[in-house]
């Protein structure tokens, strides 16, 4: 049946109308990383500056966007607050945590999600979540965003950037992210919310199952009657509108002081130029499309590494906990980490090539990139918050573009989670500076501190290890779900479910027990 679905479509129809495999999404996200780094490379070279190859980062820019919205609210209501950054005579200054600015990849990811929703003709506003889960999503946003401040970046920074760059602080952060994610998984199942763990929602899948497998689908639900939807949408719209207006037109009210003079809205066209703006925006769009076409993200990748064998061996237990069948197939097949590994290989290969011709790997030169106590505490909070959000920060941007209600509410939590850091900025800065454990930024620097040529060899070996890991994941994942490797590479998760059902005989698939339906649910028709 899965094969017939594919052959009835042209290649373009399949690319635009259907979801993608995680491998395909990971490759496309790797391309987005390369586009972003290439833009920074060209921009720096044209400006006569040293080139530092740095994958996509977003959390500092999000803080700048929150600060920009705060300044506008202050102007509209005639008040002078400074919870995200400092002010000087009504003008944002360089003191404090953030100045008004924009992250073009953030805007691009939201656009990418919206483009996919338009192409698939399926805005995810129809996805219904209970009030209890919305509360958990809000709290998850608070916890996650505060974790980004302690850990020096979000899961995008650490998993999709730091790991392929051999970052020491990212490695430790990711270990504690895994612990935090596991803790949140247990809490969510105890709260009876495990049934909402889904990488992506599609109406076609939900219409072919029932509430046991797709509890977020209710044909009678009218999203536009839900006041919480409008609260979340209004906040997101205001934030993005202020940022884009400031980035394109640089109004004086959003400029900031530097050396006593007004300078451009951070990362605006005036400050960076059209090449930078369009290049980083396009990279964000490509990344947003990759995520929206698959449910690609970071938090579920760590969970899949931890839970794949357990979900294979104890499928009945997870079915009773309400974990959807498609999610158990996703996890036991290592699909999320396969997507990440594909992105790692492309990102790392580009950085190695750039390094050999004179560019330098980034993520250096600041305490936020060193191993501190913040990496441990923040890493745990990142994992905890991401699972509570049912999506890490980068997934949140594309999910906003797709119209997910829980993400809109969780996004408000992001704004709240920044406050402890911004209100006590000097204290947090001092804490990080006084808890540095390892001063080197990369593992190859720690191993071979005096030889850059040896460092490059070590880094090349690391990229080869990541490629071998990807190959292993594909073979192991295919064996875990009982399908050929080709199916794991080419089919999206719904098609994979159909392929498993088509191969099922006497309750097994390729000698592997097929995932059981959630109690009360029936298999995909």
Image (tube, grey):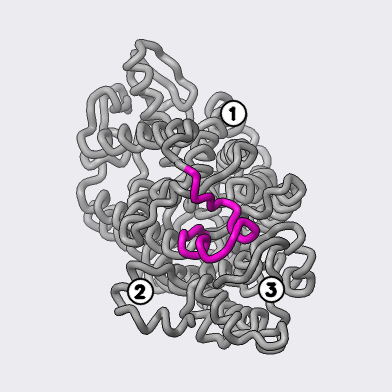
Q: Secondary structure at mark 1?
A: helix
Q: Residue at x 65, y 35 (%)?
A: 431
Q: Which residues are magenta?
A: 200-221
Give the label on residue 515, or none: 3
The C terminus, quarter of image: bottom right
Q: Earlier in the sequence, mark 1 or mark 3?
A: 1
Marks 2/1: CA–CA distance = 46 Å
Question: In the rendering, at what x and y percent does residue 175 appear?
Answer: 68, 58
Query: Cα distance, mark 3 to mark 2?
Result: 27 Å
Callout 1: 10 Å neighbours few (<14), some, many (20+)? some
The quadrant holding residue 10 is bottom left
347 or 248, which is in the foreground?
A: 248
The image quarter in which residue 465 lies:
bottom right
* Residue on which the image places disc 2: 14
Is residue 218 shown in magenta?
yes
Q: Quadrant of residue 151?
A: top right
């Amino acid at each position: 049946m899965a094969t017939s679905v594919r052959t009835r479509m042209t290649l373009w129809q399949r690319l635009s109308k259907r979801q993608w495999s995680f491998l395909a999404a990971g490759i496309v996200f790797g391309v987005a990383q390369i586009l972003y780094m290439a833009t920074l490379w060209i921009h720096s070279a044209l400006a006569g500056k040293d080139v530092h190859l740095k994958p996509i980062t977003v959390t500092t820019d999000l803080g700048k966007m929150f600060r920009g919205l705060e300044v506008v609210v202050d102007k509209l209501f005639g008040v002078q607050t400074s919870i995200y950054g400092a002010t000087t005579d009504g003008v944002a200054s360089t003191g404090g945590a953030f100045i008004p600015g924009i992250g073009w990849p953030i805007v691009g990811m939201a656009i990418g999600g919206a483009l996919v929703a338009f192409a698939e003709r399926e805005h995810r506003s129809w996805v219904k979540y209970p009030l209890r889960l919305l509360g958990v999503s809000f709290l998850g946003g608070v916890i996650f965003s505060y974790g980004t401040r302690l850990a020096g970046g979000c899961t995008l920074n650490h998993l999709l950037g730091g790991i392929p760059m051999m970052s020491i602080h990212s490695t430790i952060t990711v270990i504690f992210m895994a612990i935090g994610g596991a803790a949140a998984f247990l809490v969510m199942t105890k709260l009876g919310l495990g049934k909402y763990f889904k990488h992506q929602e599609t109406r076609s899948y939900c219409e072919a199952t029932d509430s046991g497998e797709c509890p977020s689908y209710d044909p009678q639900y009218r999203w536009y009657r839900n006041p919480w939807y409008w609260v979340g949408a209004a906040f997101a719209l205001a934030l993005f509108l202020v940022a884009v207006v400031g980035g394109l037109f640089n109004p004086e009210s959003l400029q900031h002081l530097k050396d006593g003079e007004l300078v451009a809205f951070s990362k605006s066209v005036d400050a960076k130029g059209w090449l930078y703006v369009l290049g980083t925006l396009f990279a964000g769009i490509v990344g947003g499309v990759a995520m929206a076409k698959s449910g690609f993200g970071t938090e579920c990748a760590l969970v899949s590494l931890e839970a794949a064998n357990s979900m294979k061996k104890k499928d009945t237990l997870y079915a009773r906990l309400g974990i959807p069948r498609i999610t158990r197939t996703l996890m036991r097949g290592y699909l999320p980490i396969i997507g990440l590994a594909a992105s790692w290989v492309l990102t790392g290969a580009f950085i190695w090539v750039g390094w050999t011709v004179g560019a330098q790997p980034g993520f250096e030169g600041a305490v936020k990139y060193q191993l501190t106590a913040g990496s441990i505490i923040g890493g745990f909070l990142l994992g905890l918050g991401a699972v509570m959000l049912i999506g890490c920060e980068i997934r949140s941007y594309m999910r906003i573009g797709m119209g997910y209600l829980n993400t809109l509410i969780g996004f408000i939590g992001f704004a709240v989670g920044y406050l402890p850091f911004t209100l006590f900025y000097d204290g947090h800065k001092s804490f990080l500076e006084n808890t540095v454990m390892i001063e080197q930024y990369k593992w190859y620097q720690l191993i071979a501190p005096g030889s850059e040529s040896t460092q490059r060899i070590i880094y090349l070996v690391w990229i080869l290890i990541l490629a071998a890991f990807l190959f292993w994941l594909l073979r192991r994942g295919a064996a875990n779900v009982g399908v050929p490797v080709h199916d794991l590479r080419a089919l999206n998760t719904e098609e994979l479910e159909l392929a498993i059902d088509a191969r099922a005989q006497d309750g097994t698939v390729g000698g592997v027990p097929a995932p059981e339906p959630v109690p009360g649910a029936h298999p995909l028709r």
